[in-house]
Image (cartoon, grey):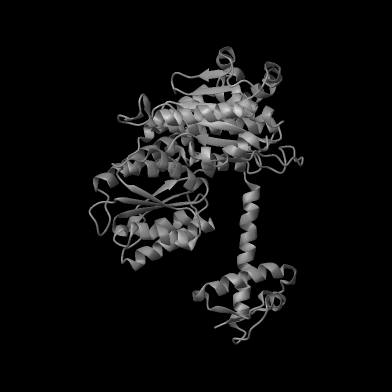
Amino acid sequence: MPAAVSWNEFRKWLLFDRKTGFRLDFSRMGVGGDSLDRMDVPLRKAIEAMRELEKGAIANPDENRMVGHYWLRAPGLAPSDEIRRAIEETQVRIKSFAAHVNCGEIRPKKSRLFKNLLVIGIGGSALGPQLVASALSAPDDRMRPFFLDNTDPDGMDRIFAAIGPSGLKSTLTIVISKSGGTKETRNGMLEAMDAYRRAGIPFAPHAVAVTSEGSQLDRQAAAEKWLERFPMWDWVGGRTSVTSAVGLLPAALQGIDTDAFLDGAAAMDAWTRTSDPRANPAAMLAAMWYLSGDGRGRRDMVVIPYKDRLDLFAKYLQQLVMESLGKEKDLAGTLVNQGLSVYGNKGSTDQHSYIQQLRDGLDNFFVTFIQVMRDRAGRSIEVEPGATSGDYLLGFMLGTRRALYEKGRLSITVTMPDVSPASLGALIALYERTVGLYASLISVNAYHQPGVEAGKKAAGEILAMQGKLLNFLRSSGGKGVTAEEAAKAISAEDDAETVFHLLEHLAANPDRRIVAEGEELFGRQYRAV
């Protein structure tokens, strides 16, 4: 392979939009014009399906729901005045609430001003706000954000330690859960309540809920008189909720320009509505994903943003793509086991990690390079004559891309002007649209997650098993039993392995008052003390 593509090839495969400032370079994907010609009709059908989705068609047939996250940045497109008003009124309420908090009109019970923000959520309810905070935070932010995004007790302790007992006095907590019953989020909320209690601080005057109207969480927040409640609608999925109250409320409280964020997303939405697939960046991305992986996801997508502020973008994209496209059956109910694997890290860190394999190892991927033109807000020094640190960052990106191209490895380059609210909104919207179009090409429902629900159901069954196990041990008068004996006692002979894991975990935590005795692992006796 040559070291670089020709100038004519580069010009042929580059898309550019003056309004967003985005450029997409497909010249290193090895796709010929004939292949793309064959994609023209399917892509036009996918674009038309997206158009119907935006008009209010039932795009999530399994749950009989509309899919409306695009209306969040263009309420005028909503299929009813009721939905349009709900969006507009919520956005006004968010900005008003944030302004009252930031100026001290809404204030904590034992401090002059809310200075910290604790966001409790999981999946898209955490990843969206985390990405926005990581990408757009500044030293002069109105509030410092913290996140409880898992049910890991040690992880929670680290967050509470970082805030500190005195810091809780000036901490506003947002609990985000559409159903209000998500266990990980509920656990985080209960742990936060306990932390406030131990610090002698009432929780309700420090708490806000983002949830569905009438949900378990909504009812609790109303009964306990939390500060405020903001809606989540059934037509917005968690992984596409960052332009709803899920992402806008934390961002507004931090002082981030949410109007610019929404405007950037709206501008990208407008570009990606282009009917001609070759002029539509989302359609072109979807086509490249499809052609490079034979429509079966046979190549992984490696996402490498060359910007520290975007270090969470690969993780965010991992959820958006894999939860949306990783499906067992297509829309006709046929077994297809579709999907597209995503992983990544930031450049130029990857020069020293998995770039070695990407260049010389398995050719089972394509890379998405994300380049940011603006280095920093202020002036840059020259670290060498004529070269700044930002010049080196670009050099490493271009050099890595060249090294991969010389070995015939595929790559796409997405260039954005800066990391601003508008540009981040546009980047997120670009990939939301691409996922929707690709889902149409492979005929799967991108807006449900039955595999996730199956995992939740199984977890519930295991915790019910643990309840039976604890009842048995505590009623055994301190008598020791093996894992196998305990499994038989609770009628779980077919799952003695799970019983073993539960017993080992209980015994490893002294506060559970279950001890394990004996040196031989599978002969251990477990008893309550």
At x 54% / y 83%, what residue is drawn? 529
Q: Is residue 148 above or below residue 315?
A: below
Q: Is residue 382 left or right of residue 304?
A: left
Q: Is residue 78 above or below residue 240?
A: above
Q: Give coordinates of residue 90: x percent, y percent.
A: 40, 40
Instruction: Identify which residue, 242 or 49, lies in the foreground.
Output: 242
In this rendering, would 183 be left or right of 247?
right
**x, y (%) of residue 175?**
43, 53
207 or 368, which is in the foreground? 368
Residue reaching furthest to the right = 334
What is the x, y in percent for residue 208?
A: 38, 52
- In the picture shown, does residue 468 fall above or below 435? below
Q: Residue 131: in sight, yes or no?
A: yes
Which quadrant: the N terminus? Answer: top right
> Residue at 44% across / 18% down in the picture?
18
User: Which of the 4 image quarters holds residue 9?
Assistant: top right
Tally of numbered discs: 0
Which residue is situated farthest in the left direction here?
112
User: Can residue 234 be seen?
Assistant: no
